[in-house]
Amino acid sequence: MTASRFLPRSIGDLRNPSASSRNANDCDPTVRPDQVSRTTSPGRSANLRGFRPGARVREVTLQLGAHVGQQNFEMDEMRDLWRWLDTSGFDWISAWDHIYEAPPAGGTIPHFEAVATLAALAVETTNARLGCLVFYVGYRNPGLLAKAAITIDHLAGGRFELGLGGGWHQWEAEAY
């Protein structure tokens, strides 16, 4: 089974799945065509109520990412998925930090460790930001995790973002 058969052709398919059947006013039926800015692209809403000519307009940027829990895939399938996400324009890709499968499966399914997985992700991609949602501070020595994070950031060319958390999975933390 390959992960790519479940994926759209590109991120454009996700952001604007049927551009030919949409117009700039689909999200807000109260906007008349003469109110739509010339810079509004197809598929984007343009609500200009209260707009004053010459007023400063704050542009909001949408970032789209994928949280890929590293289980239920063989490593080659995950690597294919990461490359597809990276070349399709996703802004970030993240992994998780779990010792056990979620939900637990008794070690019967592929499930990979976060630091090693992120190192592999770093060398397989070139564009997307990388991270872990999040590293549980109770699993690793802080100095060792900091050194691993620095190494991953170097492998990724500065694209790694370190996230730390107090954890939530009590059963897993106690078992560790």
Image (cartoon, grey):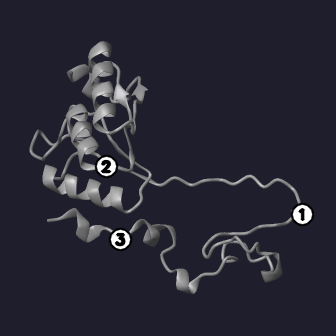
Does dot 1 land on a helix, a strand or a loop?
A: loop
- Which is nearer the N-term, disc 1 or disc 3? 3
Q: Which residue is mark 2?
A: 68
Q: Quadrant of residue 140?
A: top left
Q: Which residue is mark 1?
A: 53
- Rate crowding at label 2 as few (under 14), some (14 to 19) or many (20 or more) other CA atoms within 10 Å: some
Q: Is residue 171 visible?
A: no
Q: Tell me the amino acid under the disc marked 2.
A: Val
Residue displayed at 59% across by 82% down: 22
Residue displayed at 12% across by 47% down: 109
Quadrant where the image shows the N terminus: bottom left
Q: Quadrant of residue 46?
A: bottom right
In the rendered view, would you say 127 is above or below 25? Answer: above
Does dot 2 land on a helix, a strand or a loop?
A: loop
- Which is nearer the N-term, disc 1 or disc 2? 1
Left or right? Give the position of 28 relative to 110: right
Q: Tell me the amino acid under the disc marked 1.
A: Pro
